[in-house]
Amino acid sequence: MRWRDYLALSMRSLRRSRLRSILTIAAIVIGATGITIMLTFVTSIKSYVVSQFTQTGEVRQIQVGPSASLSFSSTSNEGGNQRAPGAKLVTPSIESAVAAIPHVVGVSAQWGGGGGSTGIQYLAYGSKKLQANFINAFETNGVFQLPLVAGRNFRASDQAGVVMVTQDYANAMGFSGNGAGAVGKTLDLHTMPGYTGAGATLPDVLPPQQQCSQGQRNCNGGPTSGLPAIDLPARVVGIVSKNYSNKSIYMPITWYIAIANQSQPNNATYTGQSQGNQPPNGPIYVRGGWQKPSTLEFIKNQGGYFSLIAVVDNTDNVAVTARRIGALGMGTATGLSQLNQQVTAANVIGLVLGGLGLIALAIAALGVMNTMVMSVLERTREIGVMRALGARRSTIRRLFTFEASVLGFFGGFFGVVLGYIILLVAKPFIANKFPHGATPNITVPIWLVVLVIALTTFIGFFSGLLPSRRAARLDPIEALRYE
């Protein structure tokens, strides 16, 4: 018999017991659908994680901080406030020492905080006022190459007056989609009253000290509190992908320090009269000029940089370079180890979920076996006729194993189709569960389609072996007498 004959006989038999065939296929469909959904999700997440680390160059990055239990994240600000007892500060001298280690091709200091910690009250674009959420600052030496959807990264010449913003900021400015229209536009960083950082006018005579009522927000006392707030223009040069970060502003670290390291008057002389607990209401004379800490002193006073990011020339040198940095008394965390941990976790989850799917298929295999046993009993007389007409036992075996394989094939095929439809419907809901609006490319890979269908076909084939052997061993004479 040709394979087409086996297929025709198998399809005729399945149509003859339509309800039983449908129920048997449905059991396989459930297992195949589960495996398709679970393994597609796991492989998509794994591919997403690998692509993120590769695109941003994080596989060659080492994060350096004062904490012995540092956890790698190029967008985090783990550092000064999480120092281990006696840990060194992350200072420019540490940065220089890290840069001198072999295989290190670049180092960038990272700092950041809410707008209020720098003296920025809010961002303004025309009549729009945007909350100054997190300001991330780093050196513009090319170490940080953020994934952009529009514009460019910082250049070495960008030391002040420029920012990169995430897509949500660009959307809030009124530029929908990827926010490309915001590139080249100017935001105003509106400072708090009393601001004396970069761009502020430092007079010899200060206005009367601000009078703050109890619980009043954005009201700071002190001799400079009467100075007005100012706007610091910042040109947007790039839009950072929402898959990387959200609600963040990026600026050169030199500008960040110049804004945050504010001056204080030396030998301020108060005039006017005090009323109760309120400050004097007259002007304040600055007799000794203005002063502020040096950049190095300011960094130390603030507890050092949050962290450093060191870039290694090759992933093979990441581990040895991290050990050498650790010998400087610093905590380290590598992007490569973080990637390996996430991939390992995804593999474990995939094995567990795949195992659950196999259990479902094993149960379905029992259904296939039961269906084939019933088919043998119902077709005993048919088998006797075939044997009497010269059909060999091997022909009978092949016929029933082929029929069982067809059940497995259809179960796998419809399982993959159903799994794809479910993933397609669930994709928007899955996207909402990811941070920053990041969405993995959840598609059923071709190899998984082939694997699932081949697996269910094999399970059908295997489940049909015992019934097919039983059918082949039937005595033709006894089978002809069967009613």
Image: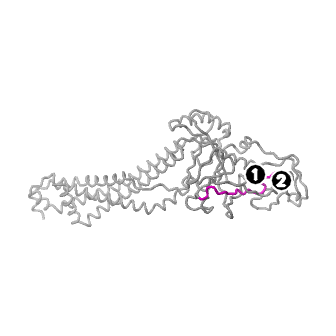
Residue at image position (31%, 52%) is 455
Residue 225, horizontal then vertical, whole percent: 81, 56
| Most frequent secondary structure within the magenta stretch | loop
Q: What segment carries the magenta color? A: 181-202
> Under tag 1, what secondary structure?
loop
Q: Position of residue 224 (x, y in %)?
A: 81, 53
Q: Residues within 10 Å of mark 1 (few under 14, many from 20)?
A: few
Q: Residue at x 9, y 55 (%)?
A: 390
Disc 2 crowd, CA 10 A, few/some/many (<14, 14-19, 20+) = many
The amino acid type found where label 1 is placed reads Gly
The residue wearing badge 1 is 199
Quarter of the image where the C terminus is located:
bottom left
The residue indicated by pointer 2 is 223
Task: State the image coordinates of residue 387 (x, y, percent, origin top left).
Answer: 11, 56
Quarter of the image holding residue 3?
bottom left
Residue 373: quadrant of the picture:
bottom left
Closer to the N terminus: mark 1 or mark 2?
1
